[in-house]
Amino acid sequence: MSLQFVKASTSDALTLNGISKRAFDSDVQVGEPSAGGPPGYMSVSYHTKMDRTNHLYNLTDNGLIVGGAILFLEKDKLNIY
C-alpha cells in the first residue's frame, strides 16, 4: 500500500464529488440522524472551484483515487475539510 496526498486536477472533481457524497451520506450508518454533509459536499462545481484555487487533493493508493481532502493553510495551521 502506498497512500499519498497529491494535488487534484480539474478532471478529478467528478470522482472526488462521488466519493464525498458516498462518504458523508454513509454517516447515517454510524449515528448521524440523516444523510448530508457540509455545503458543497455533493457539488461538482464546488469541487472544481476548490481545484482551481489549489485546495483540492486526492488521496491515492498506488495511483488509484480512494479519497480526497480540501486543504487550507491559515497562518501556520493546516485545515482539512
Image (cartoon, grey):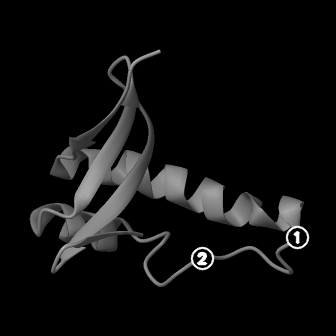
Q: Residue furthest front?
A: 76
Q: Secondary structure at mark 2?
A: loop
Residue 40 lies, with reference to residue 30, above or below; the image says below
- 49 relative position to 66: left or right: left
Name the amino acid type tagged 2. Answer: Gly
Residue at the (40%, 45%) spot, across then down: 15
Residue at the (52%, 58%) spot, across then down: 20
In space, the residues marked 2 and 1 are separated at their CA atoms by: 14 Å
Q: What label does residue 10 carry, if any?
A: none
Q: What label does residue 37 carry, if any?
A: 2
Q: Which circle, 2 or 1, is nearer the viewer?
A: 1
CB atoms at circles 2 and 1 under 8 Å apart?
Answer: no
Residue 8 lies, with reference to residue 37, above or below; the image says above
Q: Quadrant of the C terminus?
A: bottom left
In the rendered image, residue 3, in percent from the top left (x then y), is placed at: 40, 27
- 78 relative position to 36: left or right: left
Residue at the (40%, 50%) spot, across then down: 68
Would you name the residue on which mark 1 appears? 31
Name the amino acid type tagged 1. Answer: Gly
In the rendered image, residue 50, in percent from the top left (x then y), is placed at: 23, 68
In the rendered image, residue 35, in percent from the top left (x then y), is placed at: 74, 73
